[in-house]
Structure formats: structure tokens, C-alpha cells
Image (spheres, coloured by chain):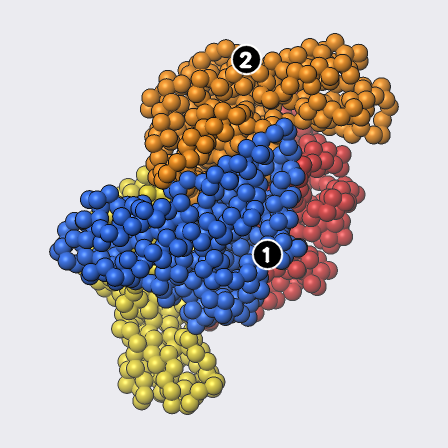
Chain colours: A red, B yellow, C orange, D blue
Amino acid sequence: MYFASDNTGPIHPRILDALARANTGYAPAYGADPLTVEVVQTLREIFEAPEAAVHLVATGTAANSLLLSTGTAPWQTIFCSRVAHIHEDECNAPEFFSGGAKLTLVETVDGKMTPEGLVAAIEAEETRGVHGPQRGPVSLTQATEKGTLYTLEELRALSEVAHRFGLPVHMDGARFANALASLGCSPAGMTWKAGIDMLSFGGTKNGLMGVEAAILFDPARSMEFELRRKRGAHLFSKHRYLAAQMQGYLEGGLWLEMAGAANTACQRLADGLRNAPGANLMFRPEANIVFARLPRATHRRLFEAGAQYHLSDDTLDGGPEDAPLAARFVTDWSAEPAETDRFLSLL
Amino acid sequence: MYFASDNTGPIHPRILDALARANTGYAPAYGADPLTVEVVQTLREIFEAPEAAVHLVATGTAANSLLLSTGTAPWQTIFCSRVAHIHEDECNAPEFFSGGAKLTLVETVDGKMTPEGLVAAIEAEETRGVHGPQRGPVSLTQATEKGTLYTLEELRALSEVAHRFGLPVHMDGARFANALASLGCSPAGMTWKAGIDMLSFGGTKNGLMGVEAAILFDPARSMEFELRRKRGAHLFSKHRYLAAQMQGYLEGGLWLEMAGAANTACQRLADGLRNAPGANLMFRPEANIVFARLPRATHRRLFEAGAQYHLSDDTLDGGPEDAPLAARFVTDWSAEPAETDRFLSLL
Amino acid sequence: MYFASDNTGPIHPRILDALARANTGYAPAYGADPLTVEVVQTLREIFEAPEAAVHLVATGTAANSLLLSTGTAPWQTIFCSRVAHIHEDECNAPEFFSGGAKLTLVETVDGKMTPEGLVAAIEAEETRGVHGPQRGPVSLTQATEKGTLYTLEELRALSEVAHRFGLPVHMDGARFANALASLGCSPAGMTWKAGIDMLSFGGTKNGLMGVEAAILFDPARSMEFELRRKRGAHLFSKHRYLAAQMQGYLEGGLWLEMAGAANTACQRLADGLRNAPGANLMFRPEANIVFARLPRATHRRLFEAGAQYHLSDDTLDGGPEDAPLAARFVTDWSAEPAETDRFLSLL
Amino acid sequence: MYFASDNTGPIHPRILDALARANTGYAPAYGADPLTVEVVQTLREIFEAPEAAVHLVATGTAANSLLLSTGTAPWQTIFCSRVAHIHEDECNAPEFFSGGAKLTLVETVDGKMTPEGLVAAIEAEETRGVHGPQRGPVSLTQATEKGTLYTLEELRALSEVAHRFGLPVHMDGARFANALASLGCSPAGMTWKAGIDMLSFGGTKNGLMGVEAAILFDPARSMEFELRRKRGAHLFSKHRYLAAQMQGYLEGGLWLEMAGAANTACQRLADGLRNAPGANLMFRPEANIVFARLPRATHRRLFEAGAQYHLSDDTLDGGPEDAPLAARFVTDWSAEPAETDRFLSLL
């Protein structure tokens, strides 16, 4: 009954196999190996983006920070949602990699920026010549930290706002596969066709040990990205082991299969929570995360039975037993239906 | 006949096994998993340093930069050898992580700093109040980039100089195992007992996919290191896969076994080179790297036969056939004796 | 009829005299001159802080950024009001000098943070171990950017909150003299006795060419400040000319005399605005700034008659003539009563 | 008998007059005042560079660091002489402003880089793809820190090397006027006509309180410079007082008159030193600095008589009285002939 995170599960056996297959003889270092060349090509095909610059890194924060700093001056500000991972959970990494850029928080509904909110935030950063921060990239998260999704229309509307002001758009796709599996659209459709300029294409939360692809749909700043990656100590010498994981991930659509499994588990969980006494869902669960309020007594029963998940902003102790407490439940590709059933039966 | 790098070989099968063993069920993220706890403990035991702060990262540049920036102010200068990896091959990563510290190059003999050279460099950075850079840590590399080793006496002498000026000492141990296997001393003896304060304990060049341990023998700045690691995007969520590799590496002394194999291969190579017509060794090969000058014609013959290694500072074309050209030969744990034999027979 | 800024007026003749008096013979550079020593001493006396570290710089942004970065780690966040100069008008200088710290915006009433708002902001930056930004200094502005003042009680309450969380408190005193003259308290009372740890003591907006004093009431980090100042290119070689200005400023209480004149001019202006048809003040004008809403037609008449001031967030054109438009009026020490009268008569 | 520095003298009375003249009424802030506009125009005329971007700052380190960081990426390295002020005396300011660029030291003869030395240094920074630092700007100092001058031919030869590698050339002209007065060439001839792309045009060491002009002969990066200046806290609000000083400096050729006086004083000093018993000059004194070795006993006698100057790299005590000790003597515009005479008579 583990629903605490999608950062904690095992990797898929086919990823281990891919690593083992890659493990023969010498291979050129630093990404010059054939496997890396191949996997870059595969990603370009999947994204229908034959010119895109594709680079692998090992953490989502690296992908986000390196992409966001590429082309961004330290006197700019990055627009993101109030609950963005880059703001709340990266220990100032975007500020570090950009050399001191600011983050401007955009009002957020259900974890999503709205075009109106984005316009307001950008216009409020009226730059007053050299005095205020200059406007920089817009970063949005798909699927969001609240488990919701931007529709393609919503993505296009935000990109349109950003581009109207001449600003590039970054997508933090730590849960890109979960979003794609849920929306059922194409990778290109959810990215460059919707105006996304840069993508952190996540793998780690969806069955890899630690690999993300940083994609610049316009490759003009590819070399800048590479220099930033090396300077940030994120260029792997034995690069084939990043490539092998990503290859195994993409091969035969494993990535979407795993994301689909996580999403399905989440839907079952959400259905159960929706019907539990005294419970209510806080956001529409569209990927692999569901937020719900449950009575304190219910939480207590669940925890005592061994369930693992996070209370959002309160503690188990110190309040009435019938008070509703918010909690976050996350599923990953390895979620076992029997465990979910056990959890739901406890509800 | 591959002697181009120790960044290009496969990982040891026992490392793959360790990854497979670790790959079951959920495990807490970000280093809170039992495997990480265990491997930290193992490293403390190996180093006879029960209090040491031990943190894993994925690249040598990360280990070096994060350690060197911990406790170092951006207005300081780091003393290192003229051929140090941190100076020549990290794309200004130490400058980046430290927020703009300088590197002061110390005169180097056979890839090694001398106490006299270090004293001279430190004293030359007479700080003139706030005007010059302030003196910062000393960083040395063991084994050196030239394949030579500091003796324990030499290490102690350098540490003594640094400590006399109140400066901490960092060891870039990308090839720590090769050095240790060659010197036959204890890990403690080659580090804190010789005055080393911080160690980048390499694994990647010696059979791992990408894991290094950053060790602070005085744990006082452990939390600073952890914040720097997170901010630098170097904290892995699925941390058990770093730990598993390191565990497999240490278990049963595999790390020293692999380093020993690399060193032995290097010795065989060096013996052959030493006796080849027109050849001469440039430095005493004490670990897994040998530099030699060979006639251009010999290089040509070797390359044409498929040998792979790097010419140091010249090109194959554009000079007389009998002119000696410097080259670097590196061996790794997976070097096959038959290949070395084939190479030597070509000589 | 100039009310656009207090950054635009002349310097007081006594400041020019002080410069002329200082201009004889050689004087040690970089702050080792007798005049600097003397002025540091004078400031310590004025602040009843015999141990305080006092350093001069030439711009308010330098004083703020250098103080805020001293003792602050780049993985921390600085708490400030939503309208703080350090957030809105310094082109990311605090982020630059701190090496990438974040600014967390605290809800603001009438330009002032409240203790409740500050507590909420600090608690929201629950650091989640190494994941979120770590809590850093609190920065408040006295007088505020809205022309309001913190009472001593309010200052103490905010400091108490900050100190409860172990955070230091910085005061941006670009208009310190205006605040002090208005509150009629002592410099010590408005600073360290109220829990302020660091002060940007402004001179430039109040009759100097460009001098501010950066004061650390606890001198422990004085050398760090000095190194940051030098590295930031803010250490003047011919330092006596900064000292001379500050000496002239303090001598005979000129600074409070000038601030009093500016405040008085502001009060007369505010009285007139308060009674003008269709006008209303937006904040209580307690120092030398008054914000008022006036009908567009009134603004038009004033501008056409030559008045100079800034509309806050709208333009003169493109709306109905009777619509109220917000404007900011600032007075400085050199404001001439006749000009104010002329302005008021136009109202 | 003061020869310790040119950072310590008074400002010229005509500069004070210029400040007084500028001190009337309100003037737009941040460089939008008429005086600034005028002085920018004057500098463009003096340099025969009608398109040049000209910006004022208050310290030489600010001019150097802001210019050197403009257009320079943090993964680059700046080439400069081993004795450059930017390397030895700016507390890592270039590293700070550039976000962590490196400085590569070029071998220096008599304080001057040679074309051969520069070529060697640039070629040694063979970048090895993303591994080494990338090549960045070349910075030279005119007059040099050793009191010598680059001839126009030498300047052109160095620029030609830099440009051949696509690198821009910066001139640290803290003593630009002294160099120009000595060479007797035109400002354009010593800068852009000789291939200089950026100039720190010094005023502080030559009779101003603290003003330097940063000149970009190609104005394409002018806005980047302005943003860097603001972010670095180097944009003065009451900018007219910088402009007034510079105006007074340029008016009627005062700057060259003052530099000429300093140079003449230096020549008289050098002549005396050249002929003193046991003395020898270390470099050809071509501007306002002379280095000489004198017997320790002579130094002792001079110091005891009240002379002020710096020993270069030794102390008065602790050696034989007849041992030659190196010393630096600097003259400024205000040097009084009688004092020089008194000094020479002591020799």
C-alpha cells in the first residue's frame, strides 16, 4: 500500500536488460557512442522533430535547470506556477544555473497557469528600462504537481501568450509519459505543435534509474546547452548507460505502457477515494496523482494498517478525528492491483 | 588494442548483479534507503573514519566541484597543479560551483606539486588585504593525470604546507583505487592520516557506470555539501542505484581487484614500450597510465593496425617519420592481455 | 513643480563644502584615510553602537545587496515585501550578489509586512530537508516604498518573528532619515533596539551625490562584507570623498534637517491633495512620498502646467476624463515651498 | 615625498568647480540628464567613434569587470598578463561578474604580453570540445602595471592575434591618459584603430574622485552592459555628478595636462634614481610609474626621512644593508616638484 511517491519504485526489468546488453567492450565516452546516437535519433522520430537537439542527463532538476538557463540572462525572470517543482523543490537550482535569474509566480488554478494569469504576471514585470528584472522564459509542468493536465488548447493558449511577448516556453515533463498516456495525443502534439520550445522529458519517475532527455526543438542553442551541462558536472563519461536506459524505455512503447499502468492504478485509487465516507477529491486526477481529503480517523486507520502516503499540510496529531486532512497519493508503473485493492478495502 | 581512456570500458558483471539485486519493491528516495545507509557505513569502515560524511554523486566533476566549493568562499583561490583535471577538463565547473573562485596553478614535476612549489604559490597569493584573492583549498590528484603517484611522505608534506597556512586539502581520487593498489597502503593512510581533508573517491573510471563518493573526513560541513548537491541537481531520487553500484564495487574488494588488473595491464604495456626501438617513457608509470614517445612511423603502424590511444600534443601528419611523438596509453580493469600482447608484438 | 523623485535633486551646499575641505594633499586609499575613520566613529556614536561595522558604498542597491548577501547562502530565500525595492527595482542585484538566493514575497498592507504575513511566508518555506530553499534574512524598508512608516512596535514585532526562526533582519533605509525625522525616535531605537541586525543607511536620496552607509550592528561578518564589497567593485580608492560627503551629511544634524524639509514639503502637498476635488490619498503619507488618485482631467491640467510626477499604473490617454488615476508624488530636501504652492493652486 | 600611489591624491580644482556648476535644480536620474548626454558625446568625439557605447561607472574594477563580462560566457577564459590588475588586485571581481569565467595568464615581458606569448596561451587553451574552458576576450593594460607602454605596433600585433582567433580585445586604461600623453598619439589611434574593442577609460587615478568611462566601440552589446551595470549596483541615480567630473576632466584637455604632469614628475624621479649609487631601474619608465632596486640602506634612509612608497616583494628588515630591494614609485598629477627634489637630494 505504497502511494508516497513515484521516485521510489524499481526500474522495469527491460531497462536492466538494456543495461546488460549495452555492457560489452569499449564505447566512446561523453555521448559519442553509437547507442547515444541511436537514442537521440529515436527521440527525434518520436517527436517528429528531425532537427531537435536532444541531450541526456540523470536528474529532472538538471534537465529543468540546464534548459531554463540556456538562452536566459541572469537579469531575467522565469514565469512559473506557484506550485512548480522548479520553485518549490529544487533548492534554488534554477537560480544557480541561470546565474541569479528570478522566478515570478503566476496565479494557478488546479495546479495550472491560466492565460489571463500569465498575461497579468508578464505585464506586471513591466521592466522599467534596466530597473526591474527582464522578462524571461515561461515554464509549465505537464502533468502538473497536482495531478491535473493542460489540454492541448490550454497549452497552445499559454504558448501563444508567451510568444506574443517574445518569450520561449519550457515544459517540465517529469511526468510527460503519464500526461501523454492520459491525453492520448502525440508527443509532437503536446509539445512543439502546441508551442513548446524546450522539454524536460522525464524517465526517472516512470521506471528508469535516473535518466531524462532535455530537448530543444530549435537546436540553435544546442552547443550552449552542452557547455552548461559539462560545466554543471552533468556530462556522463560512460554515457552509454544513460542511453541504454532511454533506449529500453522507448523500445516497443514501454514508456507509455508503464505510464498507462500508473495512470490506471491512480484511477482505481481515485474511484475508491471518491466513494469513501467523508472523503472528497481536491483536483481532477488526470495522471498518476490524486489529492483527497479524508477524515483524520480514516488516515489514522490507513497508516496503522501500513499504508504509505503524504499528508499535504497538516499532521496526524493535534486535531479532531473527524476533521478532513488533505493527502497526496501517487502511483507508479509497478503499483500492484492487489495492494490498491487492500487499500481500498480499508477505506 | 584499446588504450584511449578508462572512461570507456564496460562495468563489471558483479556491478550489474548488484543493480539487479537492489531492484525490488519501493525504497525511500534521496538517499534514505537502507542500501545507501549501508554503503556509507561500509565506506566509513574502509576509511577507518566512523564520523566521516559520505555522499554519492554520479560524476567525478560533481564530486570535485561540490567538495571544493564546500567551505570555500568565491573570493578565494584554489591551489592545484598545472595539469589538474579540475583546471583543464571541467569547463570551469569549480569556478561555477564556488561562485567564481580562482584556480592558482602550482608548478608541477611529473604531474605532481612539490611542497616548495606549493609554498611559493601560496606565498605569492599574498592577499594584500581585500585586494587579491584569498587563499583557499589545495587540491591534488592521486593518481596524477600523468600516471605518477604521490608517496605517503609527499602527501604528508603537501598537507603540512596547506595546514600551516590554514588551508584544507582535497584529493581528486578519480583513480584512487589504482593509486592504492599500487602503493599497497591503507585508504586511511593515503588520506586523512596523510592530512587529506576531503576526497573524491572515484568509481566511474574503475568499473562503475557513474558513481563517485564525496568524503568529508570532518563532517562539520556535511549539510552544506548536501545543499550544494541538491542545488547543483546532483541529488538522485532513486538513490539506491548509486548505492548498489558502490556496494558491488566495495564488496569483497572488487574495487582493488579491478584496479590491480588495470595497473598490471599498464605495467605490461609500459615494459613493452620501454623496450621498443626509438621509444622512451615520459613519466614513471605507477598506476594505469603510461606516457611514451614513439617515432611517428611507429604510431602510424600501430594506428593502421587498429590500436586506439591519444597523441598528446601533436598530429600524425606533417612531420618526419622518425620524429618522436608523445602519446598517452590508459588501461582499465577490462583490458585483455591478448590485446596488449598483440599491441606489443606490433611494437 | 517637480515631484517625480528624490533621486534627482541637487546636493546640499554644505556637502560640496565638505568635499572641498577634504581635497588637500594625499590621503591613504581604500578607506584607511582619517576622514573615513572619523565618519565611521561618528556613525557608531549616532547609533549608540560602538562595535558596529560601518562601511560606505556609493549606491543604495550596493548597500542592500552587499548586506543581504553577507551571511546568506545562495540556497536561502530572502523575505521581503511585495513592493520592496530589492525585488522590483534592482534588476536581480540581490540574486546576483547572493549567488542565486531567492526572494519570497510577503503579503503587504500599505507597503508594510505584517507579523502574521511574515510568519505565514516563513512557515510556507518549510524547507523539506534539502528540497526547498532554506530560510534566509528578512528585509524591510523604512520608510516604505508607499511612503508609510513602521512604528517601533511594528518593527519589534517583525524582528521578533524573524529572530524566533533564527533569521537576521535587514532594513533598507534609503529613506531612513525621512522615517526618523517623522517618528522622532533615536537611530538606535529604530534599528538595533528594535531588533534590526543590518542597515542600509541612505544618503543619496537625501542630499548626497551618492553615498550610503552599510551597517552591521554585529561586526562578526565585517571582513566578509569587505571582501564582498571589493569583489563587487564597490570599494572606492579615493574613499575620502565618500567619507567627506557623509561627514557633511551628519555634521550638525544636516541629515535630519534635510529630511525634515522633505517631509514638511510632503505634508503640505498631501494636505492640498487631500482637499482637492475628486482626489483621495491612497496611503497615509508619513515621510516624503504621497500617493493620490486624481481625475484624469486634473492630471492633464497639472502636466500641461509643467508639473512633474509619475502616474503609478496607467497612462494619461485612453480613458474617461473623470476617471481617477493613481499617482506618486515625492519631495526632497530642496523642494521649494513656492513651487508646492503653485502646484496646489493648480489643484 | 609621496610616491606610494596615484590613488591617493586630491582631485583637480576644476573638477570641484564642475561639480559645483552641475549642482543646480533637478536633473533626470540614471544618466538621462543633459550633462551625461553631453559628456557621452564629447567622449565619442575625442575617440572619433560616433557610434560607440559610452557608460560611466565609479571604479576601475567596475569598468573592467562589466566590460569583460559583457559578451563573455562563464565557461570561457580571459587572457591577460601575469601581472594584470584584473588578476592580482580585484578580489576575483572578473570571475564574479562573468559568473565564473577563468583567467589564463599569458607570459609577460616588462609587464607586457607578447604576440608569441598570446598565441601560445590561446593555443594551449585548445578547448577539446566541451571539456576545457572556451577561449574568451584578451585584456591588456595600457600603461602597464610596470609603468611600461605598448607601442601602437605592439597593440596592433596583439589585437591581430586575438581577432585571428575571433576574440575581442579589452584595454584596461586605468592610466590611459598617462599612456596617451607619453606616446603622443590619438585616442582613436591607441584604441579602435589598433584593434581595441572595449576600453576602461580611467579618470580616478588621474585627478577625479571616482569616475571611469566604459567604452564599447561596437555598441551592439550596449544594453547588455547597462543591465549588467544596474544588476551590479553600479548605476548611479544622481548620475550628473559622475558626468560633471568627466566633463571637467575632458574640458580643455585637462586630462592630458594632468597626465603630462604626472609623467614629467616620474621622469624626473627616474632620472634621479637612474643615477643614484647602487640603484638600477627595473623597467623602462614610460608613464607615471618607476620600479627601481636600491640598497636596503638607501631605502632605510629614505623612509626615515619621510618618503612614502612601496617595496615590491621584500621587507626592510631581515637582510644585509647593501642588498638591493625592489621598490615601486608612482607619481600623480599633483606631485610637487619641490618634494621630488627633496627626495632626489636624499638619494
Question: What residue do we see at 32% from left, 88% from top?
Answer: B278
Front position in the image: D220 or B206: D220
Depth check, front residue: D322 or D84: D322
Q: Quadrant of residue B343?
A: bottom left
Please state which of the two labelled residues, at mark 2 or mark 1, is closer to the viewer.
Answer: 1
Task: Please give the residue where the numbered disc 2 appears in the rendered image.
Answer: C182
Furthest residue in direction right, as rendered: C320
Compared to residue C21, the image places residue B113 above or below, namely below
Q: How many marks?
A: 2
On the rendered image, what quadrant is the C terminus of chain B found in? bottom left
Residue at (34, 71) in percent of width and height? B289
In this rendering, the answer to whether B48 lies above or below C285 is below
Residue type pointed to by label 1: Phe
What residue is shown with label 1? D47
Residue D313 seen: yes
Q: Indicate left or right for D257 with B249 as reference.
A: right
